[in-house]
Amino acid sequence: MRARNTTCLSLLALTLALAACEGESEAPARSAAIARSCAQIGDEPIRLEGGTFAMGQDDIYAEEGPVRETTVDGFWIDPHEVTNRQFAEFVESTGHVTVAEKPVDPAAFGVPEEQIPAELLLPGSAVFTPPERPSNSYADWWKYVPGASWKKPYGPNGPEAQSSEPVVHLAWDDMQAYAEWKGGRLPTEAEWEYAASAGQPASTEQPEEANSWQGVFPAINQETDGFKGIAPVGCYEPNPNGLYDMVGNVWEVTADLFRPGHDPADTDNPRGPSENGAYDPLNPGFPSRVMKGGSYLCAPNYCQRYRPASRQGRDPGLGASNVGFRLAYDAPPA
Ligand SMILES: [Ca+2]
Ligand SMILES: [Ca+2]
């Protein structure tokens, strides 16, 4: 709860206008320009034997290097992003109420309460809302939308969450609660990247078999991959490990804390920096978690992060409409 609105406060720092965090719900971002047949895939986790791989990438974004040979032990991992169907089973079983569905503690802003617009204290989450004009400022397309949550991903006026799509708008605590209920855990960054790269060489090319953004972000979405927004899981070819949508669709939060770049000496089942060593330039107030693989918003002119090595910090207290997760397991789930 404490970190709930750090993303909005980051926007405040950039724009000097809290209004940048407010917004109306966006129109549904689902329209298949090209029909894709989406596989009916099961939920059974996939066993990956341990191994050594080249983790990181040196030829694109500085925060992804240096490349170094890294070893991970074997583990199980979900074949697809956690879906709304799965998360609904958890909520049905436990009565869990997500962070985005609760009012915001004014203390999270660190400013006198009378300076905080009332809308920013309502339950809600960050929703991608395409700007009417070309822009290169993320404050122009990320809006804090009261009423947005995993149940209503586009806000109160938008459609309900679709059962086969990845769950979004979760905070770190929500993902942890789901993992505990399910008997799994969030993968480390190294496990996630090992699973996603699957022995394939690193590339900077925009992949065809991943839900990303074709055209000039954020103004022109050509949808040539079949989906304007989130796709149901399983609509793109799995990687050689049999895993769907590791790259693209929604970013996937991992267990590791974020700082730019990797520790070149930390190569044996690395778990990222300590809390004291964590630092996210985009969210300097609180320790962000590493998220991986990019989303449906990643385009060649912006966020070329449709790759296994890609990584960004994720505010632990605030969900977003392009961020989800999947679980890893140390033993085969019952
Ligand atoms: Ca797309
Ligand atoms: Ca993904």
Image: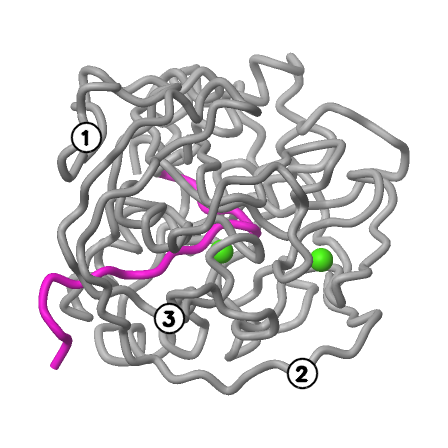
Q: How is the image coloured?
A: one colour
Q: Closer to the observer: label 1 or label 2?
A: 1
In-image side of 112 versus 288 (left or right): right
Secondary structure beneath dot 3 equals: loop
Q: Is mark 2 within 8 Å of ligand 1?
A: no
Q: Nearer the viewer, residue 59 or 113?
A: 59
**Above/below status of 144 relative to 275:** below
Q: Earlier in the sequence, mark 1 or mark 2?
A: 2
Residue 295 appears in the picture as rendered? yes
The quadrant holding residue 95 is: bottom left
The magenta stretch spans which residues? Answer: 317-334
**For mark 1, what is the residue?**
267
Labels 1 and 3: the sequence-earlier one: 3
Secondary structure at numbered mark 1: loop
Against 8, residue 211 (above or below) is: below
Q: Is residue 174 left or right of residue 216?
A: left
**Distance CA(mark 1)–CA(mark 2):** 39 Å
Q: Quadrant of residue 46?
A: bottom left
Residue beneath disc 3:
79
| Distance of label 1 from label 3 (alpha carbons) | 25 Å
Under circle 2, the secondary element is loop
Does 320 lie within the magenta span? yes
Task: Report the residue at 51% width, 79% height from top.
Answer: 163
Amino acid type at image mark 3: Pro
Q: Disc 1 residue type?
A: Thr
Residue placed under numbered mark 2 in the picture: 37
Prevalent SS, magenta region: loop
Figure quadrant of the C terminus: bottom left
Q: Please, which residue is most extreme toward the right here?
A: 133
Q: Residue at x 53, y 44 (%)?
A: 307
Circle 2 residues within 10 Å: few <14, some 14–19, many ≥20: few
